């Protein structure tokens, strides 16, 4: 996430959205800067699909929607447009002004960590996500080992960390009724030895 799309140094949000509608690949926008997003590897895709599929099946008949990395998120306080790996939204969807492809009200966000994004996902990106009023849970999922960290916002507005490791561990959520074992989350994922 270090290359710039062009040599231009500042883009307005409107310029970014215009470029993004014509682009062959997705980019993130942060306060005037546009950064191309790295392509996902097979493990990244399998983990995203396993989580999204399980959530989508569990949420039949409920008010929750599940989205993968094609739905854009706008965080106005930080001037950030981004594409989280997986989002859960309690309907109705709240769209960014004059947009039908960009939401502002995720309840849960999951990011699958990679070498190029892990520091950002843990640091600045999580800090920016925490400015979203509806945001209550954050998953950081390793691609290298069966390891997941879940941050949950409690009633005192503190973020509490829960860690999960190994096949028998089961992730539970506080914001909605759902659980998934790491064995299911990592199904068909080839982990490093």
Image: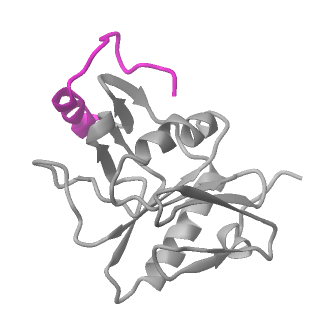
Answer above or below: position of 36 versus 130: above
Residue at x 10%, y 48% (from the top left corner): 98
Q: Quadrant of residue 9?
A: top left
Question: In the rendering, at what x and y percent does residue 144 appear?
Answer: 76, 50
Q: Is residue 10 magenta?
A: yes
Judge from the rendering whether residue 90 lies leftward or rightward of residue 4; answer left or right. Answer: left
The residue sitting at the right extreme is 193
Colour pattern of the rendering: one colour
Read off the magenta span. Answer: 1-23
- Viewer-closest of 180 and 3: 180
Q: Is residue 106 magenta?
A: no
Q: Quadrant of residue 180?
A: bottom right
- Viewer-closest of 5 and 97: 97
- Viewer-closest of 20 and 85: 85
Answer above or below: position of 48 versus 102: below
- Tell how many labels: 0
Question: In the rendering, at what x and y percent does residue 99 appear?
Answer: 15, 50
Residue at x 46%, y 66% (from the top left corner): 155
Judge from the rendering whether residue 121 lies leftward or rightward of residue 61; answer left or right. Answer: right
Residue at x 81%, y 67% (from the top left corner): 166
Question: In the rendering, at what x and y percent does residue 51 appear?
Answer: 56, 69
Question: In the rendering, at what x and y percent does residue 189 appear?
Answer: 72, 62
The residue sitting at the left extreme is 98
């Amino acid at each position: 996430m270090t290359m710039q799309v062009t040599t231009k140094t500042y883009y307005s949000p409107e310029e970014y959205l215009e470029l993004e509608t014509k682009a062959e690949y997705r980019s993130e926008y942060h306060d005037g800067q546009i950064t191309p997003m790295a392509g996902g590897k097979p493990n990244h895709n399998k983990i995203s699909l396993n989580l999204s599929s399980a959530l989508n099946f569990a949420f039949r008949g409920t008010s929750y929607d599940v989205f993968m990395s094609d739905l854009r998120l706008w965080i106005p306080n930080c001037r950030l447009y981004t594409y989280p790996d997986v989002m859960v939204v309690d309907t109705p969807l709240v769209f960014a002004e004059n947009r039908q492809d960009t939401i502002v009200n995720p309840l849960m966000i999951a990011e699958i960590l990679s070498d190029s994004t892990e520091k950002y996902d843990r640091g600045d990106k999580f800090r920016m996500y925490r400015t979203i009023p509806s945001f209550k849970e954050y998953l950081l999922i390793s691609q290298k080992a069966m390891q997941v960290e879940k941050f949950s916002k409690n009633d005192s507005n503190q973020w509490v960390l829960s860690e999960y490791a190994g096949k028998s561990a089961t992730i539970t959520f506080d914001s909605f009724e759902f659980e998934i074992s790491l064995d299911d989350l990592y199904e068909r994922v080839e982990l490093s030895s």
